[in-house]
Image: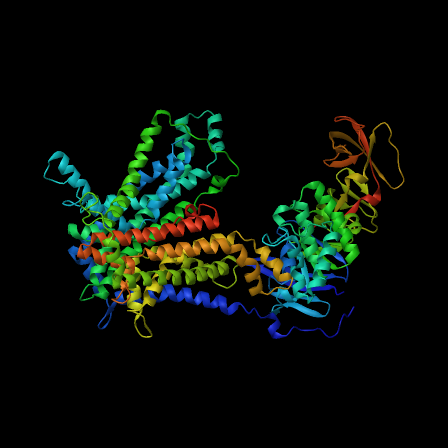
């Protein structure tokens, strides 16, 4: 039966998706953000006067001083990881599964240690345990009359200790989350079949938590590898280098960029391999069982061990939070930070001195400007990218998802080297402007922002958008009226994460700043050279207050414990 | 009121062909169900019709408008369709009234008119007075009705439903079947309805299209599909049945070993391999004491293996004497014969539907 003879063909524009340019733009921005600097970095590392050369690699790998720096980094990272594991795993078990007193408060304090910029912790520990003026050492000498210090923080063990107390939260979060998901019925199922308590722990609980333990360990090692601040503060006075401080010193006059590029590669490779190992570890078995629904989690009674266990937790938190925060606060309000805080010693001069300094004022303005700008652009870009990858809008969306989290493997210092190379030459002359810092922060925070946005969009069923489309709303309208309102709290969380990450950033800033584009962390680092501990303390407290205000605002706004969702972040 | 014409539709995901050269014509005002097991391509077909997916080959026309072809896909928002989703897809941040009114904003309906129509539609789905609630405050069945109202209020040319009842519990599901049929009879919108539940498809549709491996294997009114399935697959998928592989015996009967069955068909080629489909409820079962020849019926002796009491009936398994065939028979409750007892089963020749041996 011949139906309508004239078939109406739709006109060309009717089939056009007007949103396509936006997706392509977001994808292009990401590609440029990641590939341009890394491409330049790789190129610089093999560029010789006459073409391709491996001379830089030969030099950095053959130089005994640099070999030593590499070895120091390996020692630092492995030991920090082990110590972080030794602290984080028991703490996670205690707060997740036992009747330890003050569990909630301990959780919150672990999170406080998590958001503390490690370099501030390192400063605080210089004040606490410097060999001469350190508070603890002075008390020790006063009490015992000994001539030698109790602890010398300017040493490899001291550095490992300070790094570990700020990386153990990574282990803690991984394990606590996993323990929180294992329902007791899985353990009960073993008990009913005749397994004793220890057998249950060995055969059921431990194997289920093992991937989280290993992957927490790897995360901690990654953090320790990438850290610049703590080694710069503790290792340099002790007379040794790590890879990150060595990279930084390549940029001291005269800069040796090719060397830096070549020396970046081992670090980049190491972090990439570690992250790959972690992915494999988590992805191998079907841990869907861990998400088994509605299971009750039985609380394990500690009995007589309750208070000793609490004591151990408080000792850890003293090292990470109470003592450092205390000494920073004290120093912020003292004329001489090493003296007791008496009425004569109390002063507000540090505050007026710090905030009246033009350099500091400029740095605060720069930091907040960069924080807001990066958080806005970062949250927008991350959300767009997560949308593209979640809804599989363009070809190659898997590549975008990979690239968005790829910067996790780029230590801040290496990223800075790459950006320095990429943006000190035409067509992009950004060195010396705030823009190069902006690009550094945007790249560095992209994994955190993307992961957060990805989780948000996963929670929004695509049918919610399709329902809008089929009723006549275009792609943009659906994004505005349906997706955006539903993703709102997730986007706010992304914004806050990026902002917090930016205001504490040191390792990339220290290479990319110029006299006119200092940020707070760089000013703190400079003040160290001048020995201005009062001013350091003031800025440190200021930075911490800003961070905690954001965290609290975010939690009240969103009404849930968002920090727990964050697993892989960038190091300062 | 236009119909839908689908010709040669093909869509692959990677190497897997989800829809392969599918042809289907939905007449104006008709409700056609796409029925099939999971992975048969029914949801993909629906999403192609909605414009959420682009076809690799073939064409989808509504009336005389081409909406999808490999060259061009009209975006969903310009198709004048409405869709009811498996998850209902109600927007949690909008009230019931706002949800229902959403599509009217793009249909050029004024504000006052909009409110009136939303009101009317909510009453039509028995949700009058619920306009100010949020979807999260409604039960599953009520949410379902909101989804229906939201789709119908825009008076779409085409209505698409993607397993809309699969999230409801059994009694509510049955009630909603009739509700959807009632609304269809009232609004008479050309409708495509995707489901894997054959009972649901039968209650709701004018015609049922059975899909397998991305193609329509048979389409017809529910009675036709049930009584005259054309393939083994359709016979098995639409209702319970006994399938017996046999060989044509010349004339009007088939054989399997010692078992001979008179069938409804004429002129079978001798030695042709066939499959006989017999619905369990078309077989009569009785004590073996009463053997009688019943015109054109097959009267067979057997032994009861199992009798399962199902409330409204009894499900028997009867092993036929001198044969490897075990027939499922549905008889009235209460059970008149017990396991181990000899029985006589009577199968009318008209109940023996012949199907091709190869599927």
**Is residue B66 left or right of B229 when viewed as pictured?**
left
Q: Residue B320's spot in the image, x, y percent?
A: 76, 34
At a point 71% along the width and 50% down the height, the residue shown is B129
Q: Which of the pair B242/B90 is nearer the observer?
A: B90
At a point 46% along the width and 24% down the height, the residue shown is A194
Q: Residue B198's spot in the image, x, y percent?
A: 72, 47
Residue B245, compared with residue A42, is above or below; it is above
Q: Quadrant of residue A172?
A: top left
Q: Residue A467's spot in the image, x, y percent?
A: 62, 58
**Is residue A237 left or right of B338 when viewed as pictured?**
left
Q: Quadrant of residue A410?
A: bottom left
Quadrant in which the N terminus of chain A is drawn: bottom right
Q: Mark yes or no: residue B355 visible.
A: no
- The image's colour scheme reads rainbow
Q: Quadrant of residue B246?
A: top right
Q: Residue A444's spot in the image, x, y percent?
A: 35, 58
Residue farthest front in this picture: A343
Quadrant in which the C terminus of chain A is drawn: bottom left
């Amino acid at each position: 039966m011949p139906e309508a003879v004239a078939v109406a063909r739709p006109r060309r524009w009717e089939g056009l998706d007007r949103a396509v340019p936006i997706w392509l733009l977001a994808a292009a921005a990401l590609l440029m953000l990641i590939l341009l600097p890394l491409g330049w970095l790789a190129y610089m590392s093999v560029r010789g006067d006459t073409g391709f050369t491996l001379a830089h690699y030969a030099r950095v790998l053959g130089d005994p001083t640099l070999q030593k720096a590499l070895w120091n980094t390996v020692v630092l990272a492995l030991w920090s990881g082990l110590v972080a594991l030794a602290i984080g795993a028991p703490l996670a078990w205690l707060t997740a599964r036992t009747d330890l007193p003050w569990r909630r408060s301990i959780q919150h304090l672990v999170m406080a240690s998590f958001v503390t910029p490690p370099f501030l912790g390192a400063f605080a520990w210089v004040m606490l345990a410097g060999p001469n003026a350190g508070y603890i050492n002075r008390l020790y000498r006063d009490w015992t009359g000994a001539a030698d210090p109790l602890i010398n923080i300017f040493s490899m063990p001291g550095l490992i200790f300070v790094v570990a107390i700020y990386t153990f939260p990574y282990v803690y979060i991984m394990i606590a989350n996993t323990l929180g998901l294992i329902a007791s019925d899985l353990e009960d199922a073993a008990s009913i079949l005749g397994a004793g308590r220890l057998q249950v722990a060995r055969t059921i609980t431990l194997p289920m938590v093992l991937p989280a333990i290993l992957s927490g360990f790897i995360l901690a090692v990654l953090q320790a590898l990438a850290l610049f601040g703590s080694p710069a503060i503790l290792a340099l006075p002790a007379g040794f280098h790590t890879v990150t401080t060595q990279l930084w010193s390549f940029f001291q006059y005269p800069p040796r960029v090719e060397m830096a590029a070549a020396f970046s590669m081992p670090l980049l490779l190491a972090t990439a391999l570690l992250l790959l190992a972690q992915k494999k570890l988590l992805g191998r078995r079907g841990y869907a069982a861990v998400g088994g629904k509605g299971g009750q989690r039985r609380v394990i009674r500690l009995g007589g061990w309750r208070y000793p266990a609490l004591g151990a937790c408080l000792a850890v938190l003293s090292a990470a939070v109470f003592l450092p925060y205390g000494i920073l606060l004290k120093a912020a309000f003292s004329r001489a930070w090493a003296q007791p805080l008496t009425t004569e010693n109390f002063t507000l001069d540090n505050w007026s001195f710090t905030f009246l300094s033009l350099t500091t004022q400029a740095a605060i303005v720069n930091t907040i400007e960069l924080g807001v700008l990066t958080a806005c652009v970062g949250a927008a870009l991350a959300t767009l990218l997560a949308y593209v990858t979640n809804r599989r809008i363009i070809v190659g969306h898997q590549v975008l998802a990979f690239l968005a989290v790829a910067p996790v493997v780029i230590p801040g210092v290496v990223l800075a080297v790459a950006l320095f190379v990429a943006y000190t030459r035409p067509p992009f002359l950004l060195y010396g402007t705030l823009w190069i810092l902006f690009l550094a922060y945007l790249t560095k925070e992209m994994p955190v922002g993307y992961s957060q946005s990805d989780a948000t969009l996963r929670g929004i069923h695509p049918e919610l958008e399709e329902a809008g489309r089929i009723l006549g709303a275009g792609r943009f309208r659906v994004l505005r009226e349906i997706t955006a309102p539903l993703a709102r709290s997730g986007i706010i969380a992304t914004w806050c994460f990026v902002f917090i990450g930016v205001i504490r950033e040191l390792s990339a800033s220290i290479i990319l700043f110029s006299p006119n584009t200092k940020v707070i962390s760089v000013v703190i680092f400079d003040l160290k050279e001048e020995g201005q501990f009062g001013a350091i303390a003031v800025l440190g407290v200021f930075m911490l207050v800003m961070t905690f205000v954001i965290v609290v605002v975010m939690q009240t706004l969103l009404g849930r414990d968002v920090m727990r969702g964050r697993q892989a972040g960038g190091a300062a | 009121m236009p119909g839908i014409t689908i010709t040669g539709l093909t869509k692959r995901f990677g190497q897997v062909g989800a829809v392969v050269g599918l042809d289907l014509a939905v007449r104006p005002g008709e409700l056609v169900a796409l029925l099939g097991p999971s992975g048969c391509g029914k949801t993909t077909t629906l999403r192609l019709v909605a414009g959420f997916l682009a076809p690799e080959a073939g064409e989808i026309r509504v009336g005389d408008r081409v909406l999808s072809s490999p060259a061009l896909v009209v975006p969903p928002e310009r198709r004048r369709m409405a869709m009811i989703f498996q998850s209902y897809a109600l927007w949690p941040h909008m009230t019931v009234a706002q949800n229902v009114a959403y599509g009217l904003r793009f249909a050029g309906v004024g504000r006052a008119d909009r409110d009136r129509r939303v009101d009317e539609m909510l009453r039509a789905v028995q949700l009058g007075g619920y306009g100010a609630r949020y979807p999260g405050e409604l039960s599953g069945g009520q949410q379902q009705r909101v989804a229906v109202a939201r789709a119908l209020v825009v008076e779409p040319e085409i209505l698409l439903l993607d397993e809309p009842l699969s999230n409801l519990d059994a009694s509510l599901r049955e009630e909603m079947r009739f509700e959807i049929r009632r609304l269809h009879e009232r609004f008479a919108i050309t409708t495509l309805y995707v489901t894997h539940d054959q009972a649901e498809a039968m209650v709701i549709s004018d015609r049922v299209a059975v899909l397998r491996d991305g193609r329509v294997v048979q389409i017809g009114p529910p009675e036709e599909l049930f009584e005259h399935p054309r393939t083994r697959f359709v016979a098995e998928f639409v209702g319970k049945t006994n399938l017996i592989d046999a060989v044509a015996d010349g004339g009007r009967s088939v054989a399997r070993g010692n078992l001979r069955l008179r069938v409804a068909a004429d002129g079978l080629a001798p030695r042709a391999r066939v499959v006989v489909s017999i619905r369990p409820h078309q077989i009569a079962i009785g004590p073996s004491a009463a053997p009688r020849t019943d015109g054109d019926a097959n009267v067979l002796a057997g032994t009861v293996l199992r009798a399962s009491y199902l409330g409204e009936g009894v499900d028997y398994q009867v092993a036929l004497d001198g044969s490897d065939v075990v027939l499922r028979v549905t008889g009235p409750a209460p059970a008149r014969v017990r396991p181990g007892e000899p029985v006589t089963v009577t199968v009318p020749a008209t109940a023996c539907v012949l199907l091709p041996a190869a599927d």
